[in-house]
Image (cartoon, helix red, strand yellow):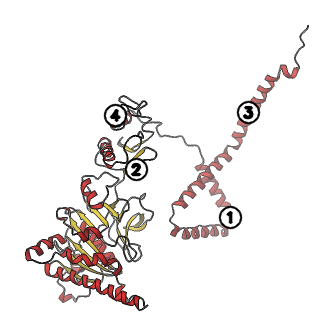
Amino acid sequence: MARRPLPRILSNGSAQIARSRELARTAADSATDVLHPLITVTRGLRRLAAAGGRKWAATPKDRRGPLLFLVASVILVVALVPYGPLLAAITLMAAAAWTGRQQASSEPTGPDEAQIQRLQSLYDALVPYFSVAEDPAPLYAHGGDWEKAFPTHDFDDDGRVSRLLIRYPAYFTDGEAESRARIEQLLHAKSGRGREYHFDWDEEGNELTVTVLPPLPTDIAAQRFVTSPGETVLGFTDPADVQRTLPLTYGEEQRDVPPVVWRTGIRSTEPHLLIAGNPGSGTTTLVRSIALQALQYGDVVIVEGGGTGEYACLTGRAGVLAVESGLAGALASLEWAANETERRLISANRARQAGHPAPDDTKNPLWILLDRPSALGHFAAADGRNDPQALLQVPLRHGRAAGVTVVIAEQFEDLELSEAVQQHTRARVVLGPASPVQLEAVLGAPPHTTPTREVPPGRGYARLGAGPVLRLQVPATPDPYDDATSETHRRAVLDLLPERTTPAEADPIPTEAAVAEG
């Protein structure tokens, strides 16, 4: 039987489909060329909108209202200016076209040879800790590949690791502090000493993120901080650790810096503070900074065990009840503080029982600041008197209800604390170089970073109660009567001092003018 020919539409259908595809591709290319400016402008508008959204999300809530008012004022001015809307539209289109242009990426696609060698070295060093012989498919093995273990890695300009994401097997004992400490110590040594690393353990996902922390600013001078009553700024920390910033003055400019805020008062869970450090670490500077802030809203009693005259600038000032450096005066001041605490408790209790508000003389905060009380304790023991720390038992136990706050600064070499001090000073600060054992002994928990051997004065760690351990940099608050103090820092402290209440002829302390002239 003869074979019938196929219909024409089926015999040349593939050729027609090919021509149709070619016409569609040509039309698409032509449309892309014609609409390229529109695509560029649209891409730029999208990028500008995303940048505006990020800026709005990063703006603190208390500053969003003024920002909206400023934007509305600009729009109103542009609308009223002749040809203003037209010029604004042209400017917006030009900015969108510039932002939406295609930019060739100049970043390298991967690590170079030296960086690969550094990553392989880290991988080989972790093999003994992250591998066992029974593992049928080990993630870490001698001669293995580091790419699966280190999915994310960044390097600084010197070629050293700045951020690294490490995956480890699920059987690693990441819940034990000793196991984690060994890994952190190893990574610190292999990644480069002299820097501070932050370790973020994700026990659920079996991942460890190692990040190199930038140094905290050391040029923050003493100034009037924007805080409410009952809030004291201990220093400043990393932006990722706190959800608040303070506007600070740096000469003629202003910057927003994240603070470590310690809250005191009747609702505080950490009403008293303990500061520990080595000589020259900045413990006295922190106590002086706290005293200047406390004088805004309350009265201050200062007991200086070192006898170096570091608080002479506060003598005779309004709100400073006493500045004592001798044993007799210190014991008398602390005994008065204990009696004042009891008086406030009794007075407030009687007012509550009678249905009246607390008397005004019990609401004014009272601060007891002790710098190196152990030195006075040695003199008291030799003279057969009571230890000054024994007189702190009442203010420490009942200070929160009576509006009394105790701050104790002591050096590591003399860190002999009474039971009441250890139990009631739940806010802790460690300044200066310290070993991990010392940090954990004072703070109650190890920091998530690796302490460096050399740190600037006022640099350390803080922990408020059961909260996390935070890096801390204390604002520069030196003794204005010290010859080694710079004129900028001297003037910053003198501007914060209250007015004098002691007559000039009876005050042996030199005036600010005399200090400035000298």
**Mark 2 residue crowding within 10 angstroms, few (<14) / some (14–19) / many (20+):** some
- Residue 232 in the image: state x and y as whole percent: 36, 72
Q: Earlier in the sequence, mark 4 or mark 2?
A: 4
Q: Nearer the viewer, mark 3 or mark 1?
A: 3
Q: What element does badge 1 sit on?
A: loop
- Comparing 134 with 500, the one in front is 134
In the rendered view, would you say 204 is above or below 65? above
Q: Residue at x 29, y 70 (%)?
A: 424
Q: Nearer the viewer, mark 3 or mark 2?
A: 2
Q: Which mark is residue 450?
A: none
Residue under pointer 3: 26
**Mark 4 residue crowding within 10 angstroms, few (<14) / some (14–19) / many (20+):** some
Residue under pointer 1: 83
Residue under pointer 2: 200
**Mark 3 residue crowding within 10 angstroms, few (<14) / some (14–19) / many (20+):** few
Q: Residue at x 33, y 61 (%)?
A: 472
Query: Amino acid type of disc 4?
Result: Asp
